[in-house]
Amino acid sequence: MISRPCWRTFGRCLWIVFCAIGAPILFAAEPARQGTAPARWPFESQVGAFQVHSDYDVSSRTALLNELAALRTQLAQQLQIRIQEDPIHLILFARHNEYRSYLRLHFPDIPDRQALYVKKRGHGMVFAYENRSIEVDLRHETTHALLNDSLPYVPLWLDEGLAEYFEMPAAERETGSPHRRSVQLRALVGRAPEVTELENIGSIGQMGNAQYRDSWAWVHFLLHESDQSRGILIRFLRELQAHSPPGSFARRLAAEMPDHRQRFLSHFR
């Protein structure tokens, strides 16, 4: 059966969710049991719920892998939702050429990106190769993987905003994002992004750097401005997880926090 990949692409990374049964086999070996990958990679290990498969020795990345394992707990604590413990496969390559060749074999139509998240039925898989931004790439993509394993649906702007937020090391998430300076400068002149505009984005092709920045900014505001702002986000995510359609986030924010625009500007000033 032919499957149609729904792919989202941005600056450095890309993720794919297969929208039909019958996605390509990613591990070209003997069929594996449901939820497992064939033991055919030169190096394989388990770090938390992450099953690591690589064509090189990743022992130098032990600290990063442990950080990714901790991300599951951090998401659960900050977002107050259940994060599933289903295995997620990390497939890592030493060089770009091998990474690109492997992906072209299995995903011939996707653009070349530094990292890739694939959702194949019940399996979450993240692909990356060694480069200077691999730590950011993997935190970003594994955030997508963990959220989309745990929630039936995540609005595009919120999915990307959360991934942009959690791609930073834990100690730098509140103050260290490269988006922060731009958002602060815009806030100084009274410019606050409209949640309605982000919510109305219908495809990844409509998102540029400004939309990723603005999505990050609202996630940062919601998580850090006050208990009230964080509670609005948590209740929205919990309703998603409960398969209870939460409706428009923009309308909810306006109803529960009528002064959200001014509070957003004050937060970043």
Image: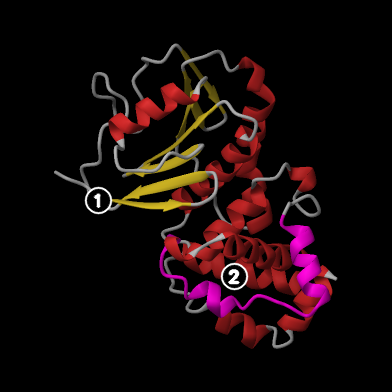
- 262 shown above or below 157: below
The spot of residue 79 in percent (x, y) is 63, 58
Colour scheme: secondary structure
Give the residue type at disc 2: Arg
Q: Nearer the viewer, residue 31 or 111?
A: 111
- Residue 36 appears in the picture as rendered: no
Residue at image point 78% right, 73% down = 187
For label 2, the residue is 235
For label 1, the residue is 4
Give the residue type at disc 1: Arg
The spot of residue 224 in percent (x, y) is 77, 64
Real-space Cα separation, disc 2 to disc 1, in angstroms? 33 Å
The answer to if 4 sits in the magenta stretch is: no
- Residue 185 appears in the picture as rendered: yes
Residue at image point 78% right, 79% down = 263
Name the disc covering residue 141, or none.
none
Left or right, 81 with respect to 181, comes to left
Residue at image point 78% right, 54% down = 174
Q: Which residues are magenta?
A: 179-204
| N-term mark: 2 or 1 | 1
